[in-house]
Each structure stands twice: as structure tokens, then as C-alpha cells.
Image (tube, rainbow, N blue to C red):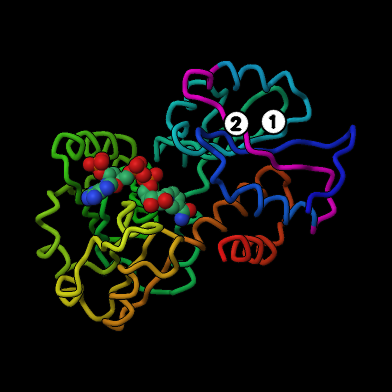
Amino acid sequence: MLGSVLGTTKILGVMGFPVSHSLSPVMHNAAIAAMGLDYVYVPLPIPVESLATAIAGLKAVQSIQGFNLTIPHKVEVIPLLDEILPIAKSVGAVNTVKRIGDRWVGTNTDVAGFLEPLKQLKYDWSSMPALILGSGGAAKAVVAACLELGCPMIHVVGRDPKKMKKFHGTMTSQLHDYNLRVHPWASIPHLLEVAGLVINATPIGMANDPHTPISELEMALLPQNAIAYDLIYTPRPTKFLQIAAARGLKAIDGLEMLINQGAIALEFWLDQPVPIEIMRQALIKQLH
Ligand code: NAP
């Protein structure tokens, strides 16, 4: 339940199109209520062709303190902002914008959100090559995260050779790192034999899709200390993670990434610690 919206209420929100499925309002409004702040977080459905008008126009609305961006705006927003912080530059995508004075400042909290559950594991990442399935928007943040983690090699597989070549060119130039290789989908079995961290950054297995990007037989190829990480958070667990857990591997779903990217964004806007457990519980309740 939202608190009262007053004449003084400050506004945060999420720009996307469509945006009605977003879980961000639930998570952020739960934190805002628990903190007793005079803020509200609202969905901002903005079609692609209206993004520039919206970004410029919302600057005049003094109560708007910042916003998230989701599909399809994370890349297109970049030239419309006044400043892009280095992490967002290296990913090539912005998911969080803050009003600082009369400037829109963009950053990316997906990278840190993805890393949070891994950082708690205390592995020697320098001995764990990463295998990323998919080369879309989320895969870009995952590549930057694996680089920050210190994975010795980052392999990305995809089904479209032209897109893979473009992905490689863009990411190596943005990250100034050349331990990134792209491969066709058929290379997966060979890559699994050496992978330490396998990340599903495709929608395979989402919602009512019963498929898995990695079969049971393929999962058996992974080293015993490997980690399977699915960015998907509905269902929990996906078939991919069920197979991984049955094989005895550490399995991580996308919920912690979602929670942590949100918590880091809220901290960025408010300049104070935020109640992450309340955000987690609000999301879990909404998903059940
Ligand atoms: P995206 O930009 O649309 O990229 C999807 C990628 O998956 C593309 O590389 C696409 O390949 C590939 N793909 C789709 N269907 C495939 C199939 N049947 N076989 C092989 N590859 C396939 O989406 P995204 O934003 O990166 O999101 C990817 C997933 O991550 C989604 O499930 C999303 O919900 C999840 N996600 C979770 C979080 C979180 O906080 N937990 C955050 C962001 C995203 P093509 O380019 O060849 O089509």
C-alpha cells in the first residue's frame, strides 16, 4: 500500500515500453514506505519514438529525482543524458538516471546487481572461465561483471553469427579487454568442459517455457565446482537450475540480481542505505 502523495512528494520511476509487467514499483515503494520518505516510484510507459521528448521534458518537472530504464531504452537513452558514469560507458547501457542539479546523470547498476550473489561466495575467480549463453542487453552487463570478477576468459555463445561478431567488436572496444571470445551455439559442449561459471542470459526457460539452454547430458560435462547462474527469476528455479542442482552444482537464480540492482539504484538516488530485506520480501510476495 502506498503512503499519501502530498504536494511535496518527490517522484522516481521506470521508463520502458511496455512497462506494466515491471516489478520495480513494488520493490521500491516497499522500501520508500519502510523508510518513511516522501517519495513515490511510478511506471512511466514511454514509446521508443517519444524517449527524447520525455527525457528533455521531465527535466522541467522538478519533483522527478531520477528513473530506471528497461527494455527498449537502455542503449538509446545514452546520447540524451548529460553525463554517463564509467561503468555504464563500459557496458554501453544505462539502467539508472539521477537528477544532479539540472543534469541527468546515467549509471548502470545491473553489473553490481549481478555480482552481488557471486561476491558472497569467495571463489578464486581467476581460475573460473565464464560461459555466457546469449548476447543481448543483459549479456553485456554480465560480460562487464565477469571481467570485474577476474574470470580468466569470457566465452559468449549465440545463434546469429552476424550479431555475435558485432557483439564482440562493441564489447572489446568498450571494455578494452580481449579475453572475450564469441562462439556459435554448437560449441557449447566443448566450452562446458572448461567453464567455471555458466550464465543463462537468454529467455529460454522463462515463465511457461519448459526448455533449458543446457541439457542434462551437457550439464554433466561441467567441472564439479562450477556455478550455474540463470538471470531468469520466474519460475524459480528454472529447468536449467533444476538440472544444475541435481548435478550437485551451485545454482543461482535472477532474483538477487533484480533486488540488488534495485537497491543500488535506490541508494544512488537517496544517498543513504536502503532496506534491502524489505525489497526482497516485497518481490517474493509479488512473485507468489
Ligand atoms: P535480449 O536483449 O532480448 O537478449 C536475449 C538474448 O537471448 C539474445 O542474444 C537472443 O539471441 C538470445 N535468445 C533468445 N531466444 C533464444 C533461443 N531460443 N536460442 C538461443 N538464443 C536465444 O534480452 P535481455 O534483456 O538480454 O534479457 C535476457 C534474459 O535475462 C531475460 O530472460 C531477462 O528476463 C533476463 N534478465 C534478468 C535480469 C535480472 O535482474 N534478473 C535483468 C535483465 C535481464 P538473438 O539475438 O539471436 O535473438
Q: Which residues are magenta?
A: 34-52
In the picture, the quarter occupied by the N terminus is bottom right
Crowding at mark 2 (Cα within 10 Å: few <14, some 14-19, many 20+): some
Q: Position of residue 284 (x, y in %)?
A: 59, 65
Which residue appears at 32% of the width and 71% of the height?
Answer: 227
**Relative to 142, does residue 163 appear above or below in the rendering?**
above
Q: Can you see residue 204?
A: yes
Depth check: 187 or 92 in front? 187
94 sits to left or right of 166? right
Which residue appears at 44% of the width and 26% of the height?
Answer: 76
Q: Position of residue 82 (x, y in %)?
A: 57, 23
Q: Which residue is mark 1?
A: 100
Which residue appears at 12% of the width and 49% of the height?
Answer: 184
Q: Position of residue 25 (x, y in %)?
A: 65, 47
Which image quarter: residue 169?
A: top left
Residue 105's disc is 2
Crowding at mark 1 (Cα within 10 Å: few <14, some 14-19, many 20+): few
Check contact, mark 2 vs mark 1: CB within 8 A.
yes
What is the three-letter code of the residue carrying label 1?
Ile
Which image quarter: residue 33?
A: bottom right
143 sits to left or right of 22? left
Which residue appears at 89% of the width and 37% of the height?
Answer: 6
81 sits to left or right of 37? left
